[in-house]
């Protein structure tokens, strides 16, 4: 009987052991968590820049076919759906619908742009507001 009671004691986990394990997990999360979130934010900025490059390539093909860029009113949707009155359109120029930016908001498209003879494409970053620093900085097609 005493042997059986000793085995039951040894098979369990004490409260102190569990608290030590939880403290280690908490320290690990506190040290590693912020670095991982920073990387996620950097990945969203990189994804927005990659999407803008894809739009720029598609807009170049659109201009080769039609001799013009889509107007601001036509927007990036002209890369997927043929605008009325445009006979040389050979699209769609993108394989899928126009995605939102990595923060879930639509990209802003403007042509004629204010920065050269190419269209302006803008994502306002994480905060969705013009300007900002770091993760909230605007992502611009001309930079």
Image: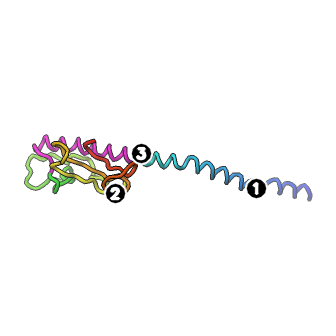
Nearest to viewer (mark 1 / mark 3): 3
Asked if labels 3 and 1 touch by Cβ distance under 8 angstroms, the answer is no
Q: Residues within 10 Å of mark 1 (few under 14, many from 20)?
A: few
Query: In the drawing, what numbered circle is on residue 68?
Result: none
Q: Seen in the image, is 102 located left or right of residue 88?
A: right
Cα distance in 3D space between marks 3 and 2: 16 Å
Q: Which residues lie in the magenta part? A: 44-70
Task: Say which of 132 and 116 sits in front.
Answer: 132
Q: Is residue 53 magenta?
A: yes
Q: Which mark is residue 128?
A: 2
- Which residue shows up at 30% across the image and 51% down it? 123
Which residue is identified by label 1?
16
* Residue 53 percent across, percent down from the top left: 28, 42
Label 3: which residue? 42
Residue 94 in picture, x, y percent from top left: 24, 47
Q: Looking at the rendering, in which quadrant would you find the N terminus? A: bottom right
Assign a secondary structure to mark 3. helix
Q: Main secondary structure of the magenta part?
A: helix
Q: Are marks 3 and 2 in contact (CB under 8 Å)?
A: no
Q: Tell me the SS state at disc 2.
A: loop
């Amino acid at each position: 009987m005493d042997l059986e009671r000793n085995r039951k004691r040894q098979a369990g986990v004490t409260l102190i052991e569990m608290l030590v394990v939880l403290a280690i997990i908490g320290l690990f999360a506190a040290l590693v968590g912020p670095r991982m979130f920073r990387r996620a934010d950097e990945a969203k900025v990189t994804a927005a820049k990659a999407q803008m490059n894809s739009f720029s390539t598609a807009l170049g093909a659109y201009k080769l076919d039609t001799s013009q860029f889509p107007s601001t009113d036509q927007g990036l949707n002209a890369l997927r759906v043929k605008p009325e009155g445009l006979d040389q359109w050979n699209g769609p120029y993108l394989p899928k619908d126009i995605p939102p930016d990595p923060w879930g908001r639509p990209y802003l498209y403007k042509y004629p742009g204010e920065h050269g003879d190419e269209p302006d494409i803008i994502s306002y970053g994480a905060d969705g507001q013009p300007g900002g620093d770091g993760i909230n900085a605007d992502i611009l097609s001309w930079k």
